[in-house]
Amino acid sequence: MIKISQLTKKFGSHISLDNISCEFHKNESIALMGANGAGKTTLIRSILGYYHPNGGEVLINGLSPIKNRVEVLQNISFVPQLPPPIKLNLDELMQYISVGANVERDLILHYANEMKLDIKANMNKSFFKLSGGMKQKMLIAISLAKKSGIIIYDEPTANLDPKARDDFYRLLKQNEDEKVLLFVTHRLEEVKDLVTRQIYMDLGKVVSDEKI
């Protein structure tokens, strides 16, 4: 579903991705690991079409995330490490997601409830003013409700307490069929029961890629 071929990305004289090639397929759960500056975030942003490569290409189901951006992003859910500063309240946010991304509002409410987020009590509260944990739960609920074939989580449990992490893992196990799950993480132990493959990056290269 994701094919990365000889991908190179430079920022000035700095090489962030150095001729990377790899593929991610359905029913794979991948932990993408490496130190800060290894190139993980640049790789994710290239998959999402945020960056134009200096060489090589990314294809999502055969389509370019740059040339076919709207169509590609319809099939990807992404939860960033730092929640975006969304000023909409939760009611407005769900309406926006429902119309803009064709996501069922009731499904967002269902997964928010499964994540123990009291959405009704906070319906008129700005997303921006929620706690870090509440923001994370809301974004996870939206990512699951979207029913995407590709779900990318960047340090997904950073703001979650242990019970919320358990809920998150349980929901992922229920929704992993026919999907690519990609976790950017520094803590393999947190996702070890979910992932089937571990990729380690360093200095813009893939230095190991192992089934686990």
Image (spheres, grey):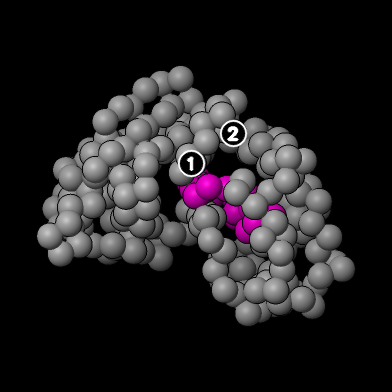
Residue 127 counted in the magenta span? no
Quick one: quadrant of the N terminus?
Answer: top left
The answer, for residue 26, to whether it is visible in the render is no
Quickly name the residue at label 1: 185
Q: Position of residue 116 (x, y in %)?
A: 81, 51
Q: Which residues are magenta?
A: 136-156
Q: Is 167 above or below relative to 10?
A: above
The answer, for residue 203, to whether it is visible in the render is yes
| Disc with the residue nearer the chain's start (2 vs 1) | 1
In this picture, residue 38 sits left or right of residue 117: left
Residue farthest top in this picture = 212
The residue nearer to you, when weighing 15 against 50, is: 15
Q: Are marks 2 and 1 in contact (CB under 8 Å)?
A: yes
The residue nearer to you, when weighing 62 against 27, is: 27
Q: Residue at x 85, y 67 (%)?
A: 120
Residue farthest right in this picture = 121
Q: Quadrant of residue 208?
A: top left
Marks 2/1: CA distance? 9 Å
Q: Is 188 above or below relative to 83?
A: above
Q: Which mark is residue 15?
A: none
Q: Quadrant of residue 85?
A: bottom right
> The residue tagged with tag 2: helix, strand or loop?
helix
Q: Residue at x 87, y 68 (%)?
A: 121
Q: Type of residue at label 1?
A: Thr
Residue 149 counted in the magenta span? yes
In this picture, residue 163 sits left or right of residue 189: right
Quickly name the residue at label 2: 190
Q: Type of residue at label 2?
A: Glu
> The residue tagged with tag 1: helix, strand or loop?
loop
